Image (cartoon, helix red, strand yellow):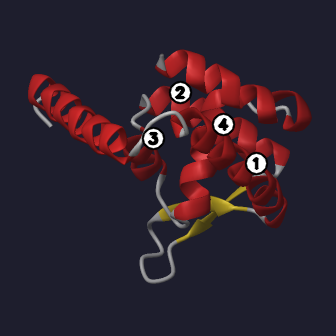
């Protein structure tokens, strides 16, 4: 189900902006949480560090993401969307949210609350299995 949803949403931005699913996930995180390290991006996207590194290289090359040093810790490298990246983000994010809204439209408040509880339990189960 997760893959089908990702594929459906990627149809909204994939052809128009030439973004892969991994690239959009990174842009979505950096759009909400700027100035993250690559490791923090991997953690927030719950993606493998190698996949994040490859996708970041493509985003940096295309000028959608920029790398800088942290304001107070010059040893630390941070990532954020570039102005062009924010333009793409500002266009894609509402489309993704609308897709999510349509997907959840058939659920009433009780169903949504129950889904949230069940998803939280599954997330806890995964965390217990992985020791996180």
Query: As rendered, which of 28 and 93 lies closer to the eye?
Result: 93
Give the x, y percent position of residue 74. Answer: 48, 75
Going from the N terminus, do you reach mark 1 or mark 2 first? 2
- Mark 3 touching mark 4, by CB under 8 A? no
Tag 2 secondary structure: helix
The residue sitting at the right extreme is 16
Query: As rendered, which of 92 and 45 lies closer to the eye?
Result: 92
Give the x, y percent position of residue 67. Answer: 64, 60
Query: As rendered, which of 18 and 96 lies closer to the eye?
Result: 96
Tag 4 secondary structure: helix
Query: At 62% from the left edge and 60% from the top edge, which residue is drawn?
Result: 31
Q: Which mark is residue 92?
A: 1
Q: Is residue 17 visible?
A: yes
Q: Nearer the viewer, mark 1 or mark 2?
A: 1
Q: CA distance from mark 4 to mark 2?
A: 9 Å
Specify whether 10 is left or right of 77: right
Give the x, y percent position of residue 128. Answer: 9, 29
Q: Quadrant of the rendered structure where residue 22 is? A: top right
- Total marks drawn? 4
- Mark 4 touching mark 2, by CB under 8 A? no
Residue that badge 2 annotates? 51
Tag 3 secondary structure: helix
Residue that badge 3 annotates? 45
128 shown above or below 87: above
Query: At 51% from the left edge and 64% from the top edge, which residue is drawn?
Result: 33
Residue that badge 4 annotates? 23
Going from the N terminus, do you reach mark 3 or mark 1 first? 3
Q: CA distance from mark 3 to mark 4?
A: 10 Å
Q: Nearer the viewer, mark 1 or mark 4?
A: 1
Query: At 41% from the left edge and 42% from the top edge, which residue is drawn?
Result: 108
Q: CA distance from mark 1 to mark 4?
A: 12 Å
Specify whether 48 is left or right of 110: right
């Amino acid at each position: 189900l997760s893959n089908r949803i990702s594929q459906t949403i990627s149809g909204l931005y994939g052809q128009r902006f030439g973004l892969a699913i991994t690239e959009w996930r990174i842009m979505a995180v950096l759009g909400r949480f700027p100035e993250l390290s690559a490791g923090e991006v991997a953690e927030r996207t719950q993606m493998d560090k190698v996949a994040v590194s490859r996708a970041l290289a493509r985003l940096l090359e295309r000028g959608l993401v920029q790398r800088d040093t942290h304001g107070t810790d010059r040893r630390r490298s941070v990532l954020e969307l570039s102005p062009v990246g924010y333009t793409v983000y500002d266009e894609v994010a509402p489309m993704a949210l609308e897709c999510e809204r349509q997907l959840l439209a058939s659920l009433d408040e009780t169903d949504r609350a129950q889904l949230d509880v069940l998803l939280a339990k599954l997330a806890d189960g995964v965390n217990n299995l992985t020791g996180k």
